[in-house]
Image (cartoon, grey):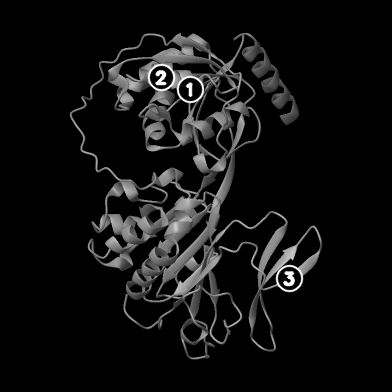
Amino acid sequence: MAVLALNQAATWTRSFSASRGVLSTLLLVEHKDKAIAGSSLTALTAAEQLGQKVTALVAGSEAKAVAETMAKYPSVEKVLVAENAAYDHGLPEVFAPLLVAAQKSLNAEYVVAGHTAFGKNILPRVAALLDVGQVSDITAVASNDTFVRPIYAGNAIATVKSKDPIKVITVRGTAFAPAAPGENAAAAVETAPEADTAGPTEWLSEELSKSDRPELEGAKIVVSGGRALKSRENFDMVYKLADVMGAAVGASRAAVDAGYCDNSLQVGQTGKIVAPQLYIALGISGAIQHLAGMKDSKVIVAVNKDPDCPIFQVADYGLVGDIFKLVPELTEKLAKHGTVLFYSHPALFFSCIILASGVHVSSLPLPADSTPATVARPVDATSAPVIVVPLLFQPPAHLTKEYIRDPQTGQVQVHYTDRSETTTRPNTPPHEEEEMIYIQGFDTDQDS
């Protein structure tokens, strides 16, 4: 009986879809200063996987310029332009009627946007106007009606099947690669259907603090501070470290609620979702809500005085120490040794190795101005750990770098394995401009 009911439902769905004619996906494009937001490009990748023709909707006073760029993406068949200053500030009460009008004119089966503050403001209203449910924050497309999304602050993954004829979807930006423009792509650009712009909300003004730092959601390196920094003045340490690394600044909700920084820096379930190449957490305990916003980072480095805090469970590298002494010293060392490298070559990467007490570091390569007597001394069992921060060019693809500790002598050596020759060359850096910086850790019982 259950099988019969399922077959009947499937037959009804097919006949209903066929009666609607050619279907398409409507993509809401977020943009600023004539540049398309990265979240919209990752949403475009998700839209491509739905198997429908994609129509992009661009609205605002700069819509035509953005539409010309959007038309260069191969998967975009058409770009709708609503050139009206009423859309400049992203008011959801103004945008929602526009999307509904565009959806009806296209007979679109999917309405898609990035899972950003912009998309999260607008698409729930669109879903309500269309009288359908919304599928939020998807991380994968399983089929044309089934999607994967995180729940319980990322601690569980749900597979959701939507039975609505129109599916309203927001896409997690870190889960999909951004779409790439094509050389010969040229989608048609048309005027969007008319919609009422007289919403109940009026835009008054805004005051923005300008910064030369990268945007938080798209940055390759993010330095975040937590409640352990104790004050707004102490949070300046995060800004200084971020500046010498060319990084964006983030914060935990506890730091934001305490007034240490602006809420636009909040990373977490109710803040921004980031997935940089490197995420450095300073004085952040690692609440579930914060981890939900940064756990997809490629490399996570945590510094905290509490060895049992949850952040260390997800960190690739961790240092138990006093952030008020460690962070200024790290900033000073990076400013001295890392500035030229960080700003002269795009293929740099930053990694962090923590050597536990008892490990000898005398065999590791040293900066030219360092001596074994000052930084490469053996570490006895009672002293604090040593943090080793390499700043180096990306090694050639055929070389694999490993830190190997001899269990008998305690010596640590850097080995570069040439996969093409299957040979091992101890202590032979792949690039002559490699630098290693050594920073002495501090006792874990000091206050932070």
Q: Kindly check if marks 2 and 1 are in contact, taking CB atoms under 8 A apart as contact.
A: yes
Let me know if residue 420 appears in the view. Answer: yes
Q: Position of residue 80 (x, y in %)?
A: 45, 14
SS under mark 3: strand
Foreground label between 3 and 1: 3
Quadrant assignment, res 192: top left
Mark 1: amino acid: Thr
SS under mark 1: helix
Which residue position holds label 2? Answer: 65
Quadrant assignment, res 413: bottom right
Mark 3: amino acid: Arg
Distance in Å between CA atoms under marks 2 and 1: 7 Å
Q: Position of residue 123 (x, y in %)?
A: 42, 28
**Is 411 displayed left or right of 135 in the figure?**
right
User: Looking at the rendered structure, which numbered label has been put on residue 102?
Assistant: none
Distance in Å between CA atoms under marks 3 and 1: 48 Å
Q: Position of residue 306 (x, y in %)?
A: 41, 75
The number of callouts visible is: 3
Mark 2: amino acid: Ala
- 107 lies above or below 89: above
User: Looking at the rendered structure, which numbered label has been put on residue 69?
Assistant: 1
Label 3 vs 2, first from the N-terminus: 2
Q: Residue furthest left?
A: 204
Label 3 vs 1, first from the N-terminus: 1
Which residue position holds label 3? Answer: 425
